[in-house]
Image (cartoon, grey):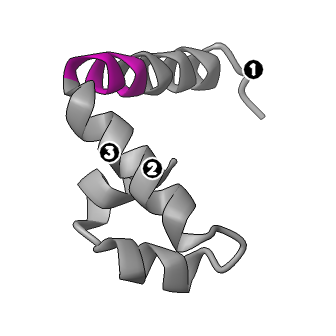
Amino acid sequence: MIVAVYLGHGWSADQIAEQYPHLKLSEIHSAMAYYFDHPDEIHRTLEEEIRDRGAAQTSLPDS
């Protein structure tokens, strides 16, 4: 979630902490450090989540 917010909004760690006060700044920095060390893995995971959401939405019955 932290990386998705960073990529989607371009927010800094401080801005993310302001929007998600339940997260510690150290947690945000740790997540970002992991992302910068493993960008391909994170991008694949995010793409899979987007595909899964799209598939779930298209499989819902019409109201």
Please report the residue visible at 31 percent of the width from the left and 17 percent of the height from the top. 41
Q: State the residue in front, 30 or 20.
A: 30
Which of pointers 3 and 1 lies earlier in the amino acid sequence? 3
Name the outermost residue toward the bottom. 18
Q: What residue is shown with label 3?
A: 33
Report whether 56 appears left or right of 25.
right
Reply yes or no: does residue 43 show up in magenta.
yes
Q: Where, quadrant-wise, is the C terminus in this rendering?
A: top right
* Residue indicated by mark 1: 61
Horizontally, residue 37 falls left or right of residue 19, namely left
Identify residue type, mark 1: Pro
* Circles 1, 2 touching at the beta carbon (< 8 Å): no
Residue at x 31%, y 37% (from the top left corner): 35
CA separation in Å, label 3 and label 1: 41 Å
- Which stretch did the figure color magenta? 40-46
Q: Amino acid at mark 2?
A: Ser
Label 2 crowd (10 A; few <14 / some 14-19 / many >=20): few
Q: What secondary structure is found at the residue carrying circle 2? A: helix
The residue positioned 42% from the left and 15% from the top of the image is 48
Q: Which residue is mark 2?
A: 30
